[in-house]
Amino acid sequence: MTQPPAHQPAAHQHPALAAADPELAALVGAEERLQADTLRLIPSENYVSAAVLEASGTVLQNKYSEGYPGRRYYEGQQNIDQVERLAVARAKALFGTDHANVQPYSGSPANLAVYLAFAEPGDTVMGMALPMGGHLTHGWGVSATGRWFRGVQYGVREDTGLVDFDAVRELALKERPKLIFCGGTALPRTIDFAAFAEIAREAGSVLVADIAHIAGLIAGGAHPSPVPHADVISTTTHKTLRGPRGAMLLAREEHAKAIDKAVFPGLQGGPHNQTTAAIAVALHEAAQPSFRDYAHAVVANARALADALLARGFDLVSGGTDNHLILMDLTPKNVPGKIAAKALDRAGIVVNYNTVPYDPRKPFDPSGIRIGTPSLTSRGLTTAHMDTVAEWIDRGVRAAGAGDEDALLKIRGEVGELMGAFPAPGLTAT
Ligand SMILES: *Cc1c(COP(=O)(O)O)cnc(C)c1O
């Protein structure tokens, strides 16, 4: 059987949708083409497999199942219970934890459940500041977590771009927070979970490792695991783990009850069973030897890309990367992050503008862009392609500075040509 082209229009793949709602079907088709034709460098995004995509579009969608397997508030759970048990067992086996809750709707609600399990409104909680690379839900002011709790924040050192553990210890011992979050959204370096655990112990705090970005790297053995060190682990399932949009909470047995109660009935109603099923599939895929290769290839590609960018005079926060993510400070190039990001988008290279630590510019118009290699690695690009990618970024940023739209269009053509040779999983009927 010959494979259909990657840009097969949605009408062919979603006949019922195309017939019932052509307007929406056209939008889905356009998005499929966009994802196929562009070089997606947003480090929190990925391409799920066709199997994950199928699982998330099943009739499991139709079932209510408040509660947990064997303890539901609705009947008819013969199959749903098995789906959730499978996902839980696979999560526990993959990460080596006592307990897993696979019901959180996404990463932010998962983190909110952790607050509900271990803290009271007004309690002090500690996390990395958002502009330093932390997440909103780690106690940042505009988030519910920063409004309902008293967030105190740590950062990275200005000279190294690395977490300042002396400052973290000092702040933790002074504030004695209920929760300490480690992990973030723009951290290009290995997280020292053991160092955080020692500080949390000294301060009497619950250590929460938020591995949303790096869960796939951990599962694939390409980043150390927080399991021996953290009290609770929070993760999304849709970033490097390459599952559906969802989340999980992992914990030692002693915290199992508190976590489960916080997710349901504390915070949520019925779990999204079609997502639970797709998480189970993604966890099964992540347990295969090929996923270890994937995780290591993501890191190898990021290193090669970082080296190729450094060779072109780019300034990378912390000087490079240990994981899937690169944070570029464009100040020396004299191009603001947002202008660069929008120009690169027109060149078919999808990135996001991002603050850099100690950014003198505003969060909505910051100095940096954030890129990563999970998506391009899923499509099969290797270290041999990273010089080309760096070259495109270099040309794109220069074109952004010069306002040269022709140069951006030329890059877009080259990007489309290369990506056409690397079909995206889930976009083709493989
Ligand atoms: C992505 C992310 C989240 C939030 O996940 P959503 O699914 O977007 O709510 C939480 N924490 C970290 C560190 C993240 O990177």
Image (cartoon, rainbow, N blue to C red):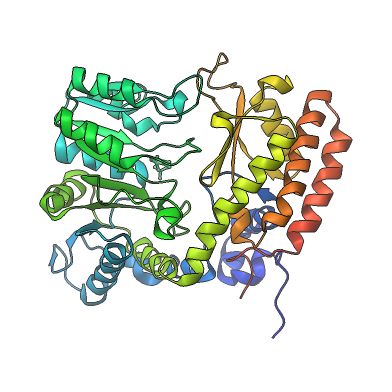
Name the residue rendered at 40%, 69% in the picture.
287
Give the image quarter of residue 165.
top left
Is residue 296 positioned above or below 85 on the image? above
- Residue 63 visible in the shown view: no
The foreground one among 94 and 148 is 94
Give the image quarter of residue 117.
top left
User: Is residue 137 left or right of 421 when viewed as pictured?
Assistant: left
The foreground one among 89 and 314 is 314
Name the residue rendered at 81%, 57% in the picture.
417
Instruction: Name the quarter where the C terminus is drawn.
Output: bottom right
Residue 71 image point, x, y percent: 12, 65
Is residue 240 positioned above or below 69 on the image? above
Residue 102 image point, x, y percent: 28, 58
User: Is residue 284 left or right of 144 when viewed as pictured?
Assistant: right
The foreground one among 174 and 177 is 174
Name the residue rendered at 86%, 44% in the picture.
410
Give the image quarter of residue 140.
top left
Is residue 286 positioned above or below 256 on the image? below
Instruction: Name the quarter where the N terminus is drawn.
Output: bottom right
Name the residue rendered at 54%, 18% in the picture.
359
Residue 110 image point, x, y percent: 29, 45
Is residue 373 positioned above or below 63 on the image? above
Please count the marks in the image: 0
**Residue at the farthest top position:** 360
- Residue 236 visible in the shown view: yes
Residue 48 image point, x, y percent: 52, 61
User: Is residue 32 left or right of 143 when viewed as pictured?
Assistant: right
The foreground one among 127 and 114 is 127
Q: Find ligand 1 in the image and state its quadrant.
A: top left
